[in-house]
Amino acid sequence: MDCNKLAELLFPNITETPEELETRYPPRDLPEGAKVTRFAPSPTGFVHFGGLFPSMTGERLAHRSGGVFYLRIEDTDAKREVPGAAEGLIRTLARYGVRFDEGAVIGDDGRITDRGSYGPYRQSARASLYHVYAKKLVAEGKAYPVFTTDEELDRLNAADRKAELQSKIRTEEAAAAQREEMLSHRRFTLEEVEAHLRHGDPFVLRILSDGDGKKTVKATDLVRGTLEFPENDEDFVLLKSDGIPTYHFAHAVDDHLMRTTHVIRGEEWLPSLPKHLQLFRYLGFRPPKYMHIAQIMRIDENGNKKKLSKRDMGANMDDYTRMGYCPEAVCEYVMTLLNSNYEEWHMQNPDKPYTDFPFDIKKMAVSGCLFDFVKLNDVSKNVLSRMTAGQVFDGLTAWAAEFDPEFHEELTADPAYAMAILSIGRGGKKPRKDLAVWADAKPYMSFFYDRFFSVTDPIPDRFDKADIDAVLTAFLASYDEKDDAAVWFDKVKKIAASLGFAADMKEYKADPDAYKGSIADVSMFLRVAVTGKTNSPDLYTVMQLLGAARTTARIRAML
Ligand code: GLU
């Protein structure tokens, strides 16, 4: 068979050569050791929490080494594409500080465009590039067309997908049957091809595999080390009947032409690695280094480890926005999952941003990371507690503008007041940790606003109404806004003692029956009257912020 002739028949319009493309996309001029990485999502929906792992890893590795990190949109599967998903993806990643140096970006008109000289960065705009290499493979006898009817094509595609999914559990028999089918397509004549083309029959292009499934091939993963796989013996599809490449083929061409040094992707691609290495060899490309990131797991209702699936709470990055997680907190949490020594480093460098952390491939997890809201909230509380009141105000109001307009209105009506509230317990060695998400702010501080004030935790029934009234009345009689904290507290103690409550906790504990209650109970009566809750920040400070008029009005209302 004259393979050059076959290549001409199949791709008559392709005149560019691989050599010309090498010149058009030259090796990048970067310092020694600089890594070129990419995030290459398919625009099929929202950004999954799991997507932050390869993207943040790629970003860290590129930027810590003085390299380049770019975004490639893998939109070759038009059936699965969701309109607007690519734009949403770019916006969400930007919110999480995942900075791309080049690639697909949102232009001034709100539509996706390219930045950088290794584009186009959307696979749907790269068909002619793929065809240059498809033509080369055919000309070298490494790929061949399969002409089939639509129904047959469907069946083949289905078989191909199934084979992909089941590559591990595929039975010998099914493999043999598929192999037989492939072999039958390898035997054809140029005349047959010409006749098909004249007839307008579509074809898929398959690789002519030289692999032997009984032999093994070694491949290296940067996290997992050297792995052994069966050689690929499947004539997998390179181009679908519409001329669009499969992921396998597209990523090989793209990662080569875009001069990617490190491919960081989900572990679901690990079984395809032998195919990819075979493809790089066929194309004469030097393969990139591969790193496969473990799947994110969660613990289900029965205590079993499960993959964090699309529908699970915590999978959709938009949920984090809605719940009011601040991106820095989520990023920091991801870092704790990605690198086992991050937490230790962070403890030693509490004030440094995660971008200063010496991210290390060797410290990455091989098995699935466990996702857990409790831990995330913990990290988040720490992050928020270290922010200034101004930073909290900005983050909170930005969130409230979208998700709680009423609260937003109150907060922004008097920013100095809001900021003073947010300053309580901030700064110092042991800052308060009341907030994990912006949505926690309202229950924490809404009592500062009359519009939201109500008594939500009443004083427990075990106290006598007359005793409570006596405390509140005595407090009103002695309250002076100008008192400092010490004087204020002294007065409360005196009121307690005069009304049969222990002013000293030790004395109370020594003989509780001798008292109606303690100073803690007296403070609690005042607290509930003023804040509506049994738990609040420092009561003296709260009264100072509320002012005498509001403080006394609330106490009177309770009376
Ligand atoms: N488009 C592929 C995916 O979303 C990308 C895998 C890769 O990064 O190479 O799974």
Image: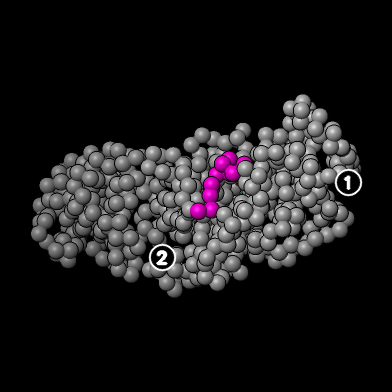
Residue 457, given in percent of the width and then of the height, sits at: 32, 45
Magenta stretch: includes residue 47: no
Q: Nearer the viewer, residue 324 or 460?
A: 324
Q: Secondary structure at mark 1?
A: helix
What kind of residue is marked 2?
Answer: Pro
Residue 333 lies left or right of residue 520; in this view the side is right
Residue 271, given in percent of the width and then of the height, sits at: 73, 52
Q: Earlier in the sequence, mark 2 or mark 1?
A: 1
Residue 382, given in percent of the width and then of the height, sits at: 40, 61
Q: Is mark 2 within 8 Å of ligand 1?
A: no
**Location of the N terminus (image quadrant):** top right
Residue topped by disc 2: 353
Q: Residue at x 70, y 38 (%)?
A: 12
Specify whether residue 53 is in view.
Answer: no
Q: Nearer the viewer, residue 512 or 294?
A: 294
Q: Residue at x 46, y 50 (%)?
A: 115
Magenta region, residue range:
117-127
What kind of residue is marked 1?
Answer: Glu
Q: How crowded is the residue under tag 1: few (<14 C-alpha within 10 Å), some, or many (20+)?
A: few
Q: How crowded is the residue under tag 2: few (<14 C-alpha within 10 Å), some, or many (20+)?
A: few
Q: Nearer the viewer, residue 168 or 314?
A: 168
Q: Secondary structure at mark 2?
A: loop
Q: CA distance from mark 2 to mark 1?
A: 53 Å
Residue 508, given in percent of the width and then of the height, sits at: 30, 63
Residue 370 lies left or right of residue 455; in this view the side is right
Magenta stretch: includes residue 123: yes
Q: Residue at x 62, y 43 (%)?
A: 128
Residue 116 in the image: above or below residue 81: below
Q: Residue furthest bottom?
A: 348
Q: Nearer the viewer, residue 158 or 507?
A: 158
Snapshot quadrant of residue 506 = bottom left
Residue topped by disc 1: 172
